[in-house]
């Protein structure tokens, strides 16, 4: 499966209003310097000490938002 990895701070900037709320991200353990990844289906995972944990998903035009925000594509 292909992913785009980014920091929690970058994720907060690209999440749309109808997706995960910022408070929910904090509750899920997303902080500015944590590492998160998004797969091609829009699933968001946060890196934990021993595994990746699914915390939600993106909707709509997330592919273009990710490319615009990060400048990278799925690898």
Image (spheres, helix red, strand yellow):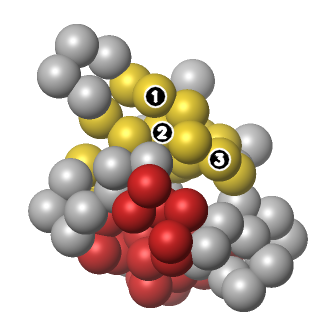
Do labels 2 and 3 touch, CB within 8 Å?
no
Image coordinates of residue 71 in percent, x first then y, are: 38, 75
Query: Cα distance, mark 2 to mark 3?
Result: 7 Å
* Left or right position of 34 against 28: left
* Left or right position of 67 against 9: right
Q: How many marks?
A: 3
Q: Quadrant of residue 21?
A: bottom right
Q: Residue 56 got which mark?
A: 3
Q: Is residue 56 above or below residue 63?
A: above
Residue beneath disc 2: 45
Residue drawn at x 44%, y 48% as measured from the top left = 28
Q: Is residue 17 above or below residue 39?
A: below
Image coordinates of residue 73 in percent, x first then y, are: 48, 58
Determine the secondary structure under disc 3: strand
Determine the secondary structure under disc 2: strand
Do labels 2 and 1 touch, CB within 8 Å?
yes
Quarter of the N terminus within the rendering: top right
């Amino acid at each position: 499966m292909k992913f785009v990895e980014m920091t929690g701070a970058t994720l907060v900037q690209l999440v749309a209003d109808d997706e995960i709320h910022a408070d929910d991200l904090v509750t899920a353990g997303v902080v500015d310097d944590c590492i998160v990844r998004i797969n091609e289906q829009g699933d968001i995972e946060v890196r934990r000490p021993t595994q990746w944990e699914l915390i939600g998903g993106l909707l709509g035009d997330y592919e273009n938002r990710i490319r615009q925000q990060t400048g990278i594509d799925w690898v």
